[in-house]
Amino acid sequence: MNVRMRVGVAVVAMLLVAGGGARAADDDKPWTLDANNWQEGKDLLPEPVLKHLQKGDYWFKVVPVDRDKFHHNYSKAFWDATESNEGKYDLDDKACGLKNKSDGKIPDFVFGLPFPKIDKSDPKAGCKIAWNFNLASEMGGGGGATFTLNGIDTGGQFRRIKAFIHSRGYQGRHFGKLKDNPENLEGEGIGGALEPVDVEGVSTLSKRYWDWDSQDAIWAYVPSTRRARRVNAASRSDPVGGLDIFADDLNCYAGKVEYYQWKVVGEGQILAPVLQPYPFPMKMTSPTRGIIETPYMTAGYEKPGSKGAPWWIQENLVFVVRPVWIVEGQSSDPYYNFGKVIMYFDQEMYRIYWKLVHNRAGEYFYTAMCGYHFVKNDETFSAVFPNLVVGVNDKTNRAALGGRFQSSFIEQNWDPSYFSLRTLTHMTD
Amino acid sequence: MTTVRGTGALVALLAALGGYLVVVERPRASVRPAAPAPLLVDPASAVARVELADGERAIAVLRRGDAWADADGRACDGAADLVDALRALRPLSVVDAAPHAPDDYGLGAGARHLRLVATDGRPLLELDVGDRNPAWTALYVRRDGAPEVLLVGAQLAWELDKLDNATINARNRLTRGRDR
């Protein structure tokens, strides 16, 4: 594309952002974006994704969304807290750490978006966006799911791993802070492989400290050695199980906010993948546990005669047009495998829908598409779950699917000793 | 006597092996292929002007202290990131040492041309920027008039587009200001 063409595209993009009438934004009927009308996706998708669209690898079922109704996918309690957070918080200049404006200390407990208003000319805007994303992710308080990781190449699936993840959040949760937090954590999680047998029982325990400078503490357990070893937090950028997917793909960014340098480089609109635009109900099975049933997202390799790449989702996934911040993130950790990462954050719901990853040599190699579903019963509680990652390695032309669980749960009251090395080392007992 | 002779022989063998390691193996072990130099070897502060052009349009961004602005003084973000990227990006490989048809790489007449100039007017870097490779992961470039086609990470394309968009945004800021 020459300079003039790019200028044209950029100008059109700006007009669309300014409300100039993108078809996708204004249509009130579902429509399909595919290779036949790929031009209509020019300002709605990252460039490498557009290339796949043009080739016929991808197609998108775009559904209209009521912006106000979508806003209320999060509870009134969450939005009220967000409003009351205005002016309360600031950022540490060096570490991008969250602090109270009043005393300069890390807040005791935060609920809601800490920065309700973002000014993109603010040099700290990128970091503020990252904190909004972080706190929006934490509103559910904790829960878990059993899911699959599928390695897929152009011929179909070549590996499948069944795994589970359980988590507990101490910050950002509805209903206030937990009484006991002896390790001063922001959150903790335990995850492990269930199938196939060669990886069964391989598990990790992660603890994220509520401070500006500690590295995450991560232990990995391998049943054959019966040992739990501490591993580097940068291992989040290592491929999981030899697949084209990374631990850092959960929510499209799973690191500590302070790990990256964040920079806003633009804004626009994007096609956001969601299971459905509006929330799923949660069925309470105990006073503290709620179950959410969601439909399975069939991929091309599972459905003969399907359209597009074998890893492309065929059913139960739709796309909504959302306004986004385009933000660059870069880790200063020399052991972290990624170079510059470009992320597309929802300007209101603070989800990351897409990320483009360069390696440390500056080569673009990987795109992750992150899909979500929302959970809400009433205005006192809501949650947003990451339920899909489509990780595509454009360098090797392979992909991995993560998530696609049909049942997940929210748990407000985990056993205090559950997230421990003891649990990790007795996983296969 | 036999013991002394045997020990002497062992010491001699040890000395010979040690000598072999020092003279032959150690230099060989230390010879590692040197990483290619980054596209821009000069410090970022040495760059005073960034020019980007194709056959139809040209933009120039000038350093103003720590910030960058276009020729009319309108602030333009993006140049600093581009300069930083050029100091980090290294050629990944030489794709074609003597291309017969540079157009095949997008390096014909329509190629973008990037030029970085020092405060004293000395050119620091000249790059012809061609197409992306088929996997979309990298770009074809030629440096400082040399014929060989190099492959450079696609982050360069991202940074160039940011610069391009930044100049458009700077112009729009002015237009909107006039409208008000």
Image (cartoon, coloured by chain):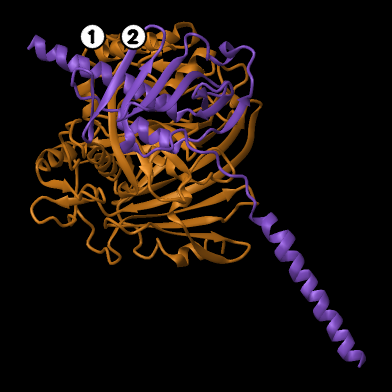
Chain colours: A orange, B purple
Residue at image coords 37%, 8%: A4
Q: Nearer the viewer, residue A26 or A102?
A: A102
Q: Name the residue under label 2.
A: A8
Q: Position of residue A317 (x, y in %)?
A: 43, 24
Subunit that carries the residue with mark 2 = A
Q: Quadrant of the C terminus of chain A?
A: bottom right
Amino acid at dot 2:
Gly
| Quarter-of-image position of residue A135 | top left
Q: Earlier in the sequence, mark 1 or mark 2?
A: 2
Q: Position of residue B6 (x, y in %)?
A: 88, 85
Binning the other alpha carbons within 10 Å of mark 1 as few (below 14), some (14 to 19) or many (20 upward) gives few
| Quarter-of-image position of residue B173 | top left
Q: Quadrant of the N terminus of chain A?
A: top left
Please determine if labels 1 and 2 lie on a single subunit.
yes
Taking B94 as reference, is A345 left or right? left
Residue at image coords 91%, 93%: B1
Q: Nearer the viewer, residue B142 or A296?
A: B142
Binning the other alpha carbons within 10 Å of mark 2 as few (below 14), some (14 to 19) or many (20 upward) gives few
Q: Name the residue under label 1.
A: A20
Q: How far apart are marks 1 and 2 (CA)?
A: 15 Å
Q: Position of residue B48 (x, y in %)?
A: 29, 29
Helix, strand or loop at disc 2?
helix
Residue at image coords 64%, 20%: B98
Give the vertical position of A337 relative to A15 (above or below): below
Q: Where is residue A192 in the image (x, y as percent from the top left)?
A: 51, 52
Subunit that carries the residue with mark 1 = A
Give the vertical position of B66 relative to B103 (above or below): below
